[in-house]
């Protein structure tokens, strides 16, 4: 049986694990890491393959662009080898179409797991599905040549790969609507100013900046980071009373752990 990592790379994803850090790379630079259902399945599988000691996942795109978005072959009558085109899916049942899109979303949703901190290292174009994949990560370190764009509306579509919620949370409803409805480019200075990018650095310094951030993320005890991420992810949806209670419960768990209670 072929090695799982070889199968992932065949579909455009490379996975490497170095102790507590996993590196996931989109590795089809000849097509600017254009995305397809096969790549999405590979990303989902990469998430499942992560060993338990991994604390930080770094996502990169090989070559000059992070990801130029969906491979337009998906909209041709022939689609991709071995699977229906998007046009064929649209002609099928509503339940079948919904299930297919739900499966695609799996590739984008696992990056928000509370036991991981996920970091996208983004350079060049991050268009459509590429933009949404960067948004799926907790943090984004960007090269100064980055160009984000949500081009789905220009194709008569909507962003459906889990990107709408984090985009609104990061930049607000009005700016998110304008970015999506116009499909314009968001460049490095605006990305940093509006919170899309946690950090912008010269392209030559991208790997070093990501390395420094990873080291800082690994410095605190893991359980404290997990509890903190969980608190922050629920904060917007909770009332003040609910969030205060969640903070108390989380701190109680941490204090009992530090005191050795229950061991």
Image (spheres, helix red, strand yellow):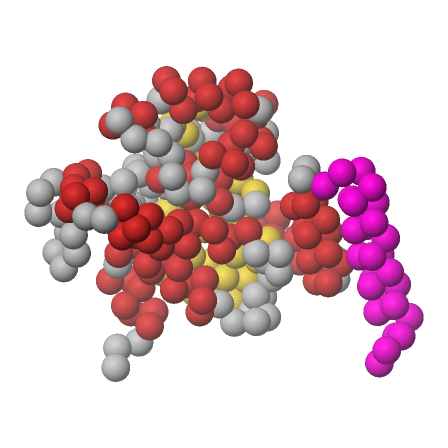
Residue at the spot 51% in from the left edge and 53% down from the top edge? 111
Q: Is residue 253 left or right of residue 204?
A: right
**Number of numbered labels in the structure image:** 0
Q: Is residue 119 left or right of residue 154?
A: right
Quarter of the image for the C terminus: give it.
bottom right
Question: Is 262 included in the stretch rendered in magenta?
Answer: yes
Residue at the spot 68% in from the left edge and 37% down from the top edge? 236
Q: Main secondary structure of the magenta part?
A: helix
Q: Residue placed farthest to the left in the image?
A: 78
Residue at the spot 57% in from the left edge and 71% down from the top edge? 52
Determine whether 135 is above or below 231 in the image.
above
Determine whether 223 is above or below 147 in the image.
below
- Which quadrant of the figure has residue 126? top left
Q: Is residue 26 visible?
A: no
Which x, y percent locates residue 256?
Answer: 88, 68
Which x, y percent locates residue 227?
Answer: 73, 56
Question: Is 47 included in the stretch rendered in magenta?
Answer: no
Quarter of the image for the N terminus: give it.
bottom left
- Which quadrant of the figure has residue 38? bottom left
Q: Magenta segment range? A: 238-263
Determine whether 89 is above or below 195 in the image.
below
Determine whether 49 is above or below 70 in the image.
below
Q: Is residue 224 left or right of residue 204?
A: right
* 250 vs 3, nearest the viewer: 250
Which x, y percent locates residue 225?
Answer: 71, 56
Which x, y percent locates residue 244?
Answer: 83, 45
* 182 vs 93, nearest the viewer: 93
């Amino acid at each position: 049986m072929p090695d799982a990592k070889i199968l992932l790379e065949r579909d455009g994803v490379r996975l490497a694990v170095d102790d507590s850090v996993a590196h996931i790379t989109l590795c089809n630079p000849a097509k600017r890491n254009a995305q397809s259902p096969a790549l999405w399945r590979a990303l989902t599988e990469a998430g499942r393959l992560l060993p338990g000691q991994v604390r930080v996942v770094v996502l990169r795109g090989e070559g000059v662009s992070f990801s130029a978005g969906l491979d337009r072959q998906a909209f041709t009558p022939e689609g991709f080898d071995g699977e229906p085109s998007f046009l064929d899916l649209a002609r099928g049942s509503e339940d079948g179409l919904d299930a297919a899109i739900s499966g695609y979303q799996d590739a984008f949703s696992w990056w928000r797991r509370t036991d991981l901190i996920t970091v996208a290292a983004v350079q060049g174009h991050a268009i459509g599905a590429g933009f949404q994949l960067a948004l799926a990560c907790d943090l984004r370190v960007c090269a100064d040549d980055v160009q984000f764009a949500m081009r789905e509306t220009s194709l008569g579509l909507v962003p459906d790969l889990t990107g709408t919620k984090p985009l609104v949370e990061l930049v607000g409803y009005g700016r998110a609507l304008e970015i999506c409805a116009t499909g314009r480019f968001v460049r490095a200075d605006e990305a940093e100013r509006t919170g899309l990018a946690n950090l912008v650095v010269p392209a030559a310094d991208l790997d070093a900046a990501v390395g420094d951030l990873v080291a800082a993320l690994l410095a605190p005890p893991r359980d404290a980071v997990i509890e903190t991420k969980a608190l922050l992810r629920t904060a917007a949806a909770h009332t003040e009373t609910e969030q205060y209670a969640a903070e108390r419960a989380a701190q109680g768990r941490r204090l009992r752990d530090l005191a050795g209670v229950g061991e």
